Image (spheres, rainbow, N blue to C red):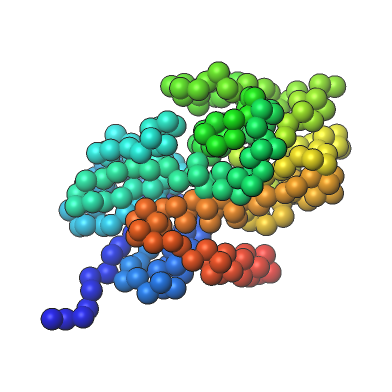
């Protein structure tokens, strides 16, 4: 009998996502464990094509997917089953193909929670704050609810109607208190952020290469951050965003988005392969890549 094994194919479904580091992360892990698998990118040009793509994936036996912007909700109606986490926020970032039966999971929730778990007691019963009203913000809301039991989640947004639209259908709406970011510029701004035990950036502000790369969601001139707070930026490139630099200078604890990036990937990897991702090897590879991209 031949020793050759068929190669399993995994991929990322998104639009214009050639920049993604998911292929680097998963291919590094497959190689480190000697698994005959590859991970590639599937850019889907329009939402109308997502259903056909998943029908094709069933026929071709593609083993699994990650799903990213803008299709985390689009894929849901085309799946056979959802995990409780994916069901809770109506968004999927991981799909498993089990002989044509597609199950959707959401590992952003556990991936977001992972680096905060050692601080769970500190967070319990206190308010926390999240900037943004996209899919990543809702994953963070659900992670706080499931793992940390804060007294409330203050959602800092530019537009209250968009925040309500995001929260529509969310079963734990009562936990979330939407506030306008403009309020940070009022005398109440200090209290709004100052009371929060954790402050999360779930917007792209501060990402390298963007026009707002040198900005922060927290207006620096107001000195709203302080010691004892945990400041968590979902942005992972650069490792130290303007928000994290300001938080560090104020004496707060900081968490880079790289931890969430690796945390969500590790959970997808174990759902697909039943094996633990070699996270130290993966982290080193990603950090080397970030250093190269910063120095180019
Ligand atoms: P999204 O659905 O596009 O949402 C982006 C959010 O950012 C929206 O609420 C948007 O507000 C807000 N925003 C954009 N520009 C803003 C500005 N100048 N001022 C204030 N708010 C602004 O994206 P997402 O999927 O939620 O992801 C958000 C960020 O998290 C992205 O940078 C993504 O790369 C990152 N992320 C990281 C990880 C990780 O593993 N580290 C995982 C998921 C996401 P409006 O609705 O008002 O435009």
Q: Is residue 60 visible?
A: yes
Q: Residue 190's spot in the image, x, y percent?
A: 82, 27
Closest to the observer, 213 or 92: 92
Q: Considering depth in this image, is 111 or 19 the residue closer to the camera?
A: 111
Query: Residue 257 or 205: which is nearer the viewer?
Result: 257
Instruction: Return the x and y of residue 172 as percentages of the image width and height.
Output: 50, 22
Q: Residue at x 29, y 43 (%)?
A: 103
In the rendered view, does 140 fall on the left or right side of 70?
right
Side of 121 where 188 appears, left or right:
right
Which residue is depicted at the point 23% across and 70% down? 6
Q: Residue at x 43, y 61 (%)?
A: 276
Q: Quadrant of residue 86?
A: top left
Residue 14 shown left or right of residue 140 in the figure? left
Regarding residue 198, the answer to whether it shows in the image is no
Q: Where the C terminus falls, by quadrant?
A: bottom right
**x, y percent for residue 160:** 60, 21
Residue 247: image location, x then y, percent: 79, 45
State the quadrant of the N terminus. Answer: bottom left
Q: Residue at x 28, y 65 (%)?
A: 8
Q: Which residue reaches farthest front?
A: 121
């Amino acid at each position: 009998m031949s020793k050759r094994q068929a190669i399993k194919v995994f991929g990322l479904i998104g639009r214009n996502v050639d920049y993604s580091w998911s292929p680097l992360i998963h291919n590094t892990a497959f190689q480190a464990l000697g698994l005959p698998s590859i991970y590639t990118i599937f850019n889907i040009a329009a939402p109308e094509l997502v259903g056909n793509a998943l029908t094709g994936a069933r026929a071709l036996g593609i083993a699994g997917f990650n799903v990213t912007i803008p299709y985390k909700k689009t894929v849901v109606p085309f799946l056979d089953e959802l995990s409780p986490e994916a069901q809770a926020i109506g968004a999927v970032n991981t799909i498993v193909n089990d002989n044509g039966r597609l199950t959707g999971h959401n590992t952003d929730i556990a991936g977001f929670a992972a680096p905060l778990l050692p601080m769970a007691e500190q967070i319990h019963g206190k308010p926390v704050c999240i900037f943004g009203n996209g899919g990543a913000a809702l994953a963070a809301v659900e992670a706080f609810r499931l793992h940390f039991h804060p007294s409330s989640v203050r959602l800092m947004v530019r537009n209250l109607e968009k925040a309500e639209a995001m929260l529509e259908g969310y079963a734990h709406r009562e936990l979330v208190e939407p506030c306008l970011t403009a309020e940070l510029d009022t005398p109440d701004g200090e209290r709004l952020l100052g009371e929060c035990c954790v402050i999360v950036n779930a917007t792209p502000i501060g990402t390298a290469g963007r026009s707002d790369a040198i900005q922060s969601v927290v207006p620096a001139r107001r000195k709203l951050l302080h010691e004892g707070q945990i400041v968590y930026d979902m942005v992972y490139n650069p490792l130290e965003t303007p928000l994290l630099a300001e938080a560090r200078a104020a004496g707060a604890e900081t968490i880079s988005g790289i931890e969430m990036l690796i945390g969500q990937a590790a959970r997808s990897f174990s759902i697909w392969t039943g094996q633990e991702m070699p996270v130290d090897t993966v982290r080193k590879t990603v950090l080397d890549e970030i250093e190269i991209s910063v120095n180019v």
